[in-house]
Image (tube, rainbow, N blue to C red):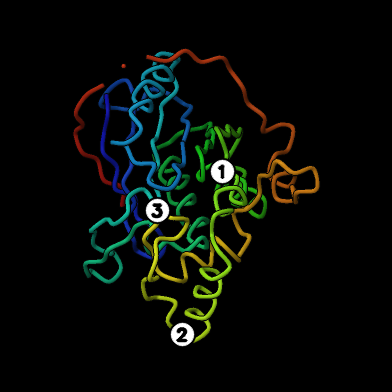
Amino acid sequence: MMFRLNVPTKRGSVLNGVLFRQGEKRSADTVMIAITGIHGNFYSNPFYYNIGDTLNSGNIDFIYAQTNDAFGRIETVNVLTGKKETIGSWNERFSYTDEDIDAYLTFAEEEGYEHIILAGHSLGANKVIYYLSHNHDPRVEHVFLLSPANLTYMMSGVTEREKKIIKEQVERGDGDQMLPFPFMGWVECIANTAWDWQFSGLLNNVHTAKDGDFYRLSRSLTPERFWSEPMTISRTETLPSFSAT
């Protein structure tokens, strides 16, 4: 069965996810939480249906955990202010990573799961690495990283002129205004978001170059957290709703 999740963060923004489990009530002790990448939403990645069904068949529940950047823009209501807000890849800050992942871990903990596997796909894998590199969270027993994003490669097409525009816009106090061009050619976003991608280095933690900085990766992946299991995949449906408070 699938259930929609509405998971609030400490800043009040509500993240949408999907919980896969075998029945109305929890019967499994183990859950895998998969943090998604940019535009990695439930509708664009149908293979997550198959992963959920496969894990459920092994008595492991599965949370498809969309974060702030799951869509270009998401209309929602902040649970702290009660006001409407628009979140998305257009205004994500990489510093939200800790709150977003913590929100899903807290949900799983409050649901009574005894064993948590924290997974990440694409940019979500980079977020998992970043989170665990400075949060040695005892709730996370194992880690599963699927196709982490190489940010250096992704940003290789950003021109020097575009970098200059991003810097100037942020430095003059207009970081919360939209850029006059799509960042990387496809992300319509504010200058602060582009700054995080291009200059912060927060999520640039996976590399192909031998001299790349793997400090965060080495800090996050302790031997006892490695988890791998062969997985076969195949399957689809509609979901009842379920809110976390």
Kindly report which numbered mark, 1 or 3, lies closer to the viewer in this rendering: 3
Q: Amino acid at mark 3?
A: Trp
SS category of the residue bearing label 1: loop
Q: Specify the quadrant of the image occupied by residue 25.
A: top left
Give the x, y percent position of residue 179.
Answer: 40, 70
Residue located farthest toward the right when viewing the structure as drawn: 211
At x 61% / y 22%, what residue is drawn?
228
Q: Is residue 106 above or below residue 178?
A: above
Q: How many marks?
A: 3
Mark 3 lies on residue: 186
Relative to 67, 140 lies left or right: right
Q: Is residue 14 above or below residue 233?
A: below
> As rendered, which of 17 and 200 lies closer to the eye?
200
> As rendered, which of 122 and 18 lies closer to the eye?
122
Q: Amino acid at mark 2?
A: Gly
N-terminal of the pair, mark 3 or mark 2, is: 2
Give the x, y percent position of residue 126.
Answer: 57, 46
User: CA gap, disc 1 to disc 3?
Assistant: 16 Å
Mark 2 lies on residue: 173
SS category of the residue bearing label 3: loop
